[in-house]
Structure formats: C-alpha cells, structure tokens
Image (cartoon, coloured by chain):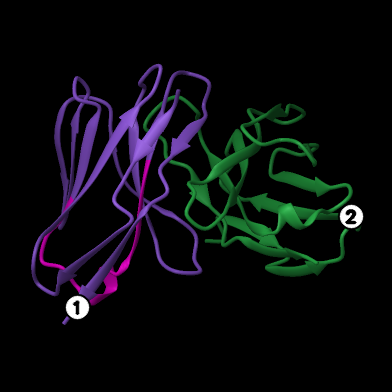
Amino acid sequence: NAGVTQTPKFRVLKTGQSMTLLCAQDMNHEYMYWYRQDPGMGLRLIHYSVGEGTTAKGEVPDGYNVSRLKKQNFLLGLESAAPSQTSVYFCASSAQGWSNQPQHFGDGTRLSIL
Amino acid sequence: GQNIDQPTEMTATEGAIVQINCTYQTSGFNGLFWYQQHAGEAPTFLSYNVLDGLEEKGRFSSFLSRSKGYSYLLLKELQMKDSASYLCAVREDSNYQLIWGAGTKLIIKP
C-alpha cells in the first residue's frame, strides 16, 4: 500500500532557483493538501484542492503555485526559492473534507534554500 | 482569531498513563483530530471527536468539551514507541481546512 508518495525526499536549492515537488496518492481521494512544517509551529496549509482541476489558497500561499491536472497528483512549485522557504513540506489527501475522514500524509520533502 | 494551545513537551514513565491537553479558540467548530508524529516521519491519524465525550481506541482515548474549547488525549500503558509528538488539529467550519497546534513532544523514560 503506497498511500501518499512524495518526491523528492530531500533537496538543496540556491536562492532564486525553481523546483517542483511531486505528490501522488493511490487511494482515489478527492481532496489533496500541501503543508509546511517549521520548528515550534503547527502545520500551515499552503494550497489545497477539492478535486481534479481545482486549487485554492491556504494560510501561506505566497511564493508557491500548485496544479492538479490529474486526480491522483498534486504538484507544488516554487518559482524563485527564498531562504524563508526552507522547511519540511508535507502532502496529504483525504476522501472528503468535512467529515471524520482523516488526512493521510506523505513522508515529507526536506527542502533547504541557501 | 484562531489559536490552538498544547504543552510543548511532556515526560512520562514506561507503563504509566499520560494526558496531553489541547485548548482551542476558533470562530467555529466542526471536528477535532489527534495525530501522532515520530521524529522525521509523517503525521498519522489517531482519533476524531466532533461530539462531547470520550472516544476510546485501545490504549488511546480522546475527550472533547466543546463548551470549554478543550480536548485531551489519554495514553495508557505507555510504551517506549509512544515517544513522539502529538498534534491537535481543529476544523473550524466546512471549508475543509484544519488549524494545527504546534504539537506536544512526549518523552518516555524507562
């Protein structure tokens, strides 16, 4: 059971570089989410999607873009990386967004911006 | 504004019982989740409460009081593998988003 798979697991970037984080889920979930996790803070929602072809902004969307061209994939892009974007990024998915259906998380991508 | 408070760190002894508290102040309430996160790993779902009262699931139980904006996670018969961070998250309304506490790091000593 793969669940939620994130690629890559680690990455080091220089300021100004761009990259895309990949998230794939095999549970046929409608809802997908991108979070960042920083020391001493709760998970913060960057963007989310309620279905194929839809995206919406979360709490901290600036500097990030997303796309959900296929139901199983949710991509997070950094157009011009900044040191403040150094963080651990988690992708999650859920069958629904409003019930007791929990979010299932990937193993995370540890991103450092120099 | 939105606020979720949890103790930063707690220490307990193997075989004992520990209660991890979570208080929240949100504009609405539509469910509370508890997750476990081992260091360097993904959060994993533990429990969900939307009505007042206690939900029991094996060694873990979770309690909710909506009028007090309060929940706790109770862990019994502690094992070394329970050393982890425990995250409390609240869904304010039907906009699908969860508001997360910073987590409580639980250290289990032999």
- Which element is circle 1 on? strand
| CA neighbours of label 2 inside 10 A, class few (<14), some (14 to 19), many (20+) | few
> Mark 1 highlights which residue?
B109
Q: Are marks 2 and 1 on the same chain?
A: no
Q: How far across and down, in percent of the image, does residue A74 sit? A: 72, 44
Q: Is residue B80 magenta?
A: yes
Q: How far across and down, in percent of the image, does residue B28 sit? A: 38, 17
Q: Which residue lies at the image location 53% right of the left edge and 52% below the top edge?
A: A105
Q: Is residue B64 magenta?
A: no
Q: Quadrant of residue A99?
A: top left
Residue in front for this viewpoint, A96 or A114: A114
Residue range of the region highlighted in magenta in the rendering: B74-88
Q: Quadrant of residue A44?
A: top right
Q: Are marks 2 and 1 in contact (CB under 8 Å)?
A: no
The chain letter corresponding to green is: A
Q: Quadrant of the C terminus of chain B?
A: bottom left
Q: Quadrant of the N terminus of chain B?
A: top left
Q: Quadrant of residue A58?
A: top right
In the displayed structure, A89 sits above or below B77; it is above
| CA neighbours of label 1 inside 10 A, class few (<14), some (14 to 19), many (20+) | few
> Mark 2 highlights which residue?
A18
Looking at the image, residue A13 sits to the left or right of residue B108; the answer is: right
Q: Which residue lies at the image location 25% right of the left edge and 27% below the top edge?
A: B69
Looking at the image, residue A89 sits to the left or right of residue B55; the answer is: right
